[in-house]
Image (cartoon, rainbow, N blue to C red):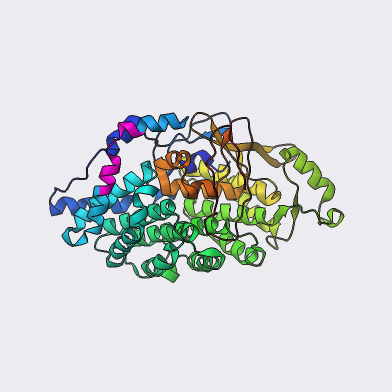
Amino acid sequence: MPDLRRQIFESGKTVSRKAASRESSRTPSRTGSAQNSRQSSRNASRNVSRNASRHPSDDDDAGSVSDDTALSIGSLDDLDNVDQANTDWSQELSDRIQEILDRKRSSVQGREDTYAAYCRLSKFHYVEEEIRSHTKDLMAAFCKSIKLESSVRETTLALRALELLTVTAFDDTIYENVEPVLTRTIRDSTSNIVKEAAIHCLGACTVFGGAGEDGIMDQMTFLLDIVASDGQSIDAADDAGSVSSALQEWGYLATEIEDLESESEEAIQIFMDQLSSSDPSVQIAAGENIALLYEKSYTVQEDDDDVEEAEGSEEDDSDEAEIGGGPKLLKRYNAYHNTPELERQIQSLASIHHKRINKRDKKSLHNSFASILTTVGNPRRGPMYNTAIDQATNKHYGSRLTVKIGREGVMNIDRWWKWIRLNALRRILEGGFAVHYYQGNRAVLDSLPVMMRMDMPSDRSGSRKSAKPRTSHRMVLAGGSDED
């Protein structure tokens, strides 16, 4: 699989229960000289939104990815124990909210510290109830910091806070209120780091803030222009961070659209151009989007489909039997006009041995593009774990990817839309992903497959025609069931 284990954890470190408790009870410091503040801003700026190019160490396991992030969670009882250990986190959050809303008495450094504390608390706790009556005021405060851009650190933290607010509140009025601010920041900010953070924030607000299909398509066009121009359309020429973030968010938004037939040809051509980038994060994001578009060119067979006229009948049946069952998928259109040319380009990345590429990036490219090549060759195949090549047939194969969350839960990541959504949510929630899943964050539960026991497969439709929240939802723990 595309160094799947590495990418899924690249946004946040695993945090022990004791560390989370200690972190949650910490009050942000209000002291420090102006010199320390400036140095802190510079250090934070260098570390914001570069997740795609940072890869933690990769260890082998038996065909699954563990997502014991932030806390090792096996049951709601464990969560109750953690909450008892962090009895003051709710009060700290209330204090930080009041500080955010009382802007007249704040300084740049004070707002930086307060936003950092808000982000920390919002990651490690599902705070929907605590922020419910303050959503609009918090949104306005974050947007003011984003517009004024007093410091890079304050602006990027405000963008992160707005992301977390959106993924927690699940309010379908957020997008219409923040989209102009975010778009202007992406175009006009003098900092490429701020542009990159704003692109990620725009993606989250589009999906979870009520944009609907038309709004999603508008933003996909905007992001594609950034990619096609190598960042020049937003005055970030050849900035890998801006281009990779635009690629990642384009893919995330694309998982929400059912039919991309009319967009597929042009988008794949643009993504192919990015495969020759010198930045591995850009190459991998472009490749994953290509795999997603090929996957979308096949849909589940309907009752009224003429199976005899469907392409590749006998070969398709044998492939599906080899893959392991599931609903029959039929080809609806050609994702791209010249698949052989695309396969040659992907193959070169799957076997690249350039001396100027470091060992870690080389391994990431090899694993990613071997799996992407598998899907382009057969769009019925989603992400594969430990993808290998059959020397006799020269075909790629591998085992299905599963992600373990806690002690018993497992999520089947057998389709690219699942993988891309999971990566996006892991980037937003970082070490708090498991907490939000188990505590019932609607945005997380509505976006991903149902978590089941390790021996129970699960699946869910990969597209929604609207970004608005569903009226009903249910958190499913190990052994549970779900109704779509």
199 shown above or below 413: below
Q: What predominant SS class does the magenta segment belong to?
A: helix
78 relative to 480 in the view: left or right? left
Is residue 263 on the magenta stretch? no
47 relative to 349 in the view: left or right? left
Image quadrant where residue 325 sits: top right
Q: Position of residue 441 (x, y in %)?
A: 46, 46
Q: Position of residue 4 (x, y in %)?
A: 53, 41
Is residue 85 on the magenta stretch? yes
Image quadrant where residue 55 sits: top left
Report whether residue 16 is seen.
Answer: no
Report whether residue 107 is seen.
Answer: yes
Which residue range is magenta in the image?
83-94
Residue at the image position 70 percent from the left and 37 percent from the top:
390
Residue situated in front as seen by the camera: 163 or 347: 163
Q: Position of residue 431 (x, y in %)?
A: 40, 40
Residue at the image position 42 percent from the left and 49 percent from the top:
428
- Outermost residue to the right: 308
